[in-house]
Amino acid sequence: MSEAGAPARTARIRTAAARLCGQLGWAPLHEVVLPNGRRADILALRPDGGFVCIEVKSGPRDFLADAKWPDYRACCDALFFAVDTDFPQALLPGDTGLIVTWELTAELLRDAPAHPLPPARRRALLHRFALLAAGRLALHEDPAGAAMLRAGLLVE
């Protein structure tokens, strides 16, 4: 598949990876601005309280043009890449986890090495995660009221 369809391809990979998160018991949030200013494609909270960052890559050009991904390690306990079956996996660093998707299905092919967050950073990230999730739920349930909630909580 050419990278001309990258936005649709990225959306499929992200959806499949989020579905896998659900199967694994992880709670995924899409497009999360992290404390260091980077934006995670998916930040998932695991049942053990750990955070997983999943960086979605639509193709080799997307991966090679992005040198920001090492910055995500400071904001998670484990870092994964999610790609589709056409992606040349040899490009990806071996010290990250690997999720491979096809259509809207995904499989965890390689677990990510753990690099536990310091407790204070985990607590701050959990707070950010909860505010963001609550704000998005409020937006879904009451769009007009959510604007007031966002202003009051200073949630993205």
Image: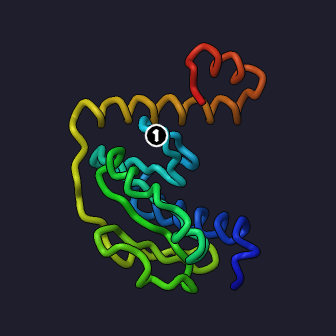
| Residue 99, quarter of picture | bottom left
Q: Is residue 42 above or below residue 136?
A: below
**Residue carrying label 1:** 34
Q: Is residue 45 above or below residue 24?
A: above
Identify the residue shown where x is 69% and y is 77%. Answer: 3
Identify the residue shown where x is 52% and y is 65%. Answer: 17
Tell me, yes or no, if residue 20 can be seen here. Answer: yes
Assign the N terminus to one quadrant of the image. bottom right
> 85 or 90, which is in the foreground?
90
Q: Residue 12, position in %: x, y?
A: 65, 69
Q: Is residue 56 left or right of residue 127?
A: right
Dot 1 amino acid type: Leu
Assign the C terminus to one quadrant of the image. top right
Q: Is residue 42 left or right of residue 142?
A: left
Identify the residue shown where x is 59% and y is 69%. Answer: 62
Q: Residue 146, position in %: x, y?
A: 69, 24
Identify the residue shown where x is 54% and y is 36%. Answer: 133
Tell me how many marks there are: 1
Q: Mark 1: few, some, or many residues within 10 Å (few <14, many ≥20)?
A: some
Q: Is residue 71 left or right of residue 30?
A: left
| Residue 98, quarter of picture | bottom left
Q: Residue 59, position in %: x, y?
A: 59, 76
